Amino acid sequence: MPQYRFASFAIALPLYRVFEYRIDEAAPVIAGTRYRLPFGQGTRSGILLEVSDHSDFDAAKIKVVRERIDLEPVLGGHMLALAKWMSEYYLQPPGDVLFQCLPGYLRGARAYQPLRVKRWRLLAADAEAISVLQRTSPRQFEICQALKCEPAGLTAVGLKRINPGWHPVVKALEGKHLIGWEWDDKPTPAVDAPVMPQLSAEQDAIVSAIEPRLQQFAVHLLDGITGSGKTEIFLRLIRSCLERGRQVIYLVPEIGLTNQLLERVRQRFGECFAISHSGLTEYQRFQAWDRFRRAEASIMLGTRSSLFSQCDDLGLIIIDEEHDHSYRQEDGVRYHARDVAIKRAQMLDIPIVLGSATPSLESIANCERSTFFRYRMDHRPTRFDPPSIQLIDVRNSRFDFGCAAQTFARIDAHLQDSGQVLVYLNRRGFAPIVMCHECNWQAQCRNCDARLTLHQSQQALLCHHCGYSEAVPEACPECGHGEIKHYGIGTEQLQQGLTQRYPDTPVLRVDRDVISSREALKSRLEQLQSGAPCILIGTQMIAKGHDYPAITLSVVLDADQALFSASYRASERLTQTLLQVCGRSGRGDRAGEAIVQTRFPEHPLMQALLRRSYRQIADELLQERRLLGFPPYARVVIFRSDAQELQQALSKLETIKTLLQQSPRFQQLSTIGPIPALMTRRIGRYRAQLSLLTTDHRLLRAVLASAMPAIQEIPSTPRASWNIDIDAYDL
Ligand code: ADP
Ligand code: ZN
Ligand code: ZN
């Protein structure tokens, strides 16, 4: 009987299982490598997990692996272990989890081969042989001359510049042993002795406290006001780590406005970092992933999914603005990058440093449980501390494009004083409401339970949820009335209004509609960097992490909506956003000012913002959460379903609930639903949810452990799909 080997594979399918195949080739097999597998009528790529000498099945009936795709494994042993943990903790299909740990470029069937390039050098300075070439082969001579001037050698790109038909010429020179090549994969050296500011006493104490702990797992939270110098501390810790020859992952919520962070990193560490974010192409992200993997880059600077970057010797993970919502992946495999990062650090026994001026309540509660080290920073190393918030009561005000007269007065004053002004309005487009006055018709998306937003520059009504767009109607589609009106203000209209009012001042807008072009964004950022007076308008993109010292005034136009949100997280989020926006001003050598327009100045949250620090507000919110039995003192799990009909979605969840009820302890959990989701129809599908809430983590795990095997058998089909969201953000 022939000796077979059997292997389990993960396939990117929403199925809670792995697949067994037979491997007949004798070559060594390594876990984490992708193979082409026969599957159904066709083939699929699968990631090899484990190999064994025997199988419980009849060897003759097991399908045989077709071929190996990768030359080297795409996932290392540690990533396989982390993905296994994610799959078990988030109860997600193992194949989905594993494939989403890969860069998008490698999720299909493209072979992975490290991206190395050759570099040619002149071998021996055989001056005589070379000078002979001058007569016998001018083209070979030309290349030798060029290489003589480049002691570091030239890659194909450089050689091609000298001679477009370089390849045979170089081959001939190689044959004569005059030139030779090496792989160009030496790590880029870091710059020596960069200029670093003298640490403040506060910063110095923190660096000294963390540095001795860099060799083992610990979670460190830098809880420091905006501009207190957290980034500077990150940079020092990165340096210590690189000096030990180890690599660093540095996560930020958004790359958009953090260009100057890139500059800071470049100044400190030269070109030895890789960048990855959604503004790059799939191939560029793959290049970054590969450079980090080959240790050509020592630092990976990127957004959420950069957490899954691999390398041989990770020494530190940094998460800036750890409270930021964008660290949660809300579709496909749902996870929280901060939580997975902590797990990764723990598995590797390395430190992780979180930073925020407005830490999440989860992290603050973890500090109380003393599982995190917390470091407070209460002052800016620059001249001025962040401005305190002033409320502008706009109950009786007249508005021009969303701004009250008092607001204009402050903008005027700061511009006259050569300051830059930031205006935050979290609504893109021209106007959020388009309607007919005769019959009250409103422009609605045909795929979603949502209004269409007027985008004037495109002459279109757009849905911000599904991307649906239609032309602005000439007359009311309902009653034929000839006049359609729009209400409310978006960033597009605000920009138009402010440009008219301040014709001599550049009014820059940064939101998803305008930054699709990198060039456009770059020129805006250069304007800000120049320090000349200007107005920066934007959505949440401008609330995060940037450091432009010439901004002296922050204005928040419309905060009131969030005061009446149904979400139990609304107060936390609003407080964080307002403090972050306001903290963007006064970072240089001039004091900042921060104003918030509101119709509800008496609202307790607005009053709290006036009188209390973030820490005090956070402590109060935590007490409230404890009383209500909400996260972080409780766990939330949501089963979601979406389907062609609402009834199908609800009944899928009823089936799930019935299975949960078979667990005797299910009654001890609080449950809500199945009920239609808040936005019931989205992108043409009906959505419903079933939420479970409890303060007893063990109980929840026990119920899920007993019910999930049966639930996982429920098919998730295009007609009616379902998924589970562990540690869901909302209820
Ligand atoms: P945060 O990350 O807390 O918002 P940053 O590290 O970006 O703060 O620091 C805010 C500003 O203060 C930056 O312009 C930075 O260059 C400057 N800064 C930080 N630390 C120092 C220091 N020790 N001395 C002088 N300036 C500093
Ligand atoms: Zn009408
Ligand atoms: Zn829509």
Image: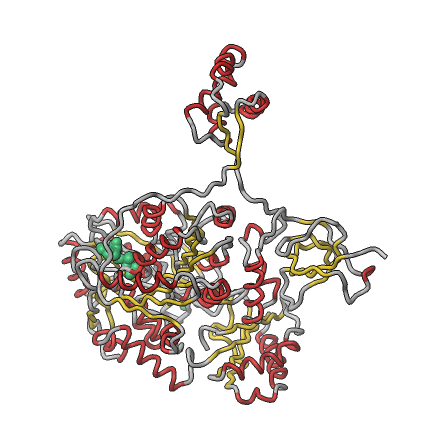
Q: Is residue 478 visible?
A: no
Q: Residue furthest front?
A: 212
Q: From the top left corner, tell me how far across and down residue 21 is, in percent.
A: 74, 59
Colour scheme of the picture: secondary structure
Q: Is residue 173 visible?
A: yes
Query: How many numbered badges does the structure rendering display?
Result: 0
Q: Is residue 119 left or right of residue 8?
A: left
Eyeballing the image, is 166 above or below 567? Answer: above
Q: From the top left corner, tell me how far across and down residue 43 is, in percent.
A: 71, 54
Q: Residue furthest top?
A: 135
Q: Looking at this view, is 670 or 28 the one in front? A: 28
Q: Looking at this view, is 376 or 623 the one in front? A: 376
> Which quadrant of the rendered structure holds the N terminus?
bottom right
Q: Looking at this view, is 528 or 121 the one in front? A: 121
Q: Looking at this view, is 261 or 565 the one in front? A: 261
Eyeballing the image, is 618 above or below 348? Answer: below
Residue at 70%, 59% in the rendered image: 51
Q: From the top left corner, tell me how far across and down residue 550 is, in percent.
A: 21, 53
Q: From the top left corner, tell me how far across and down residue 40 is, in percent.
A: 74, 59
Residue at 77%, 58% in the rendered image: 63
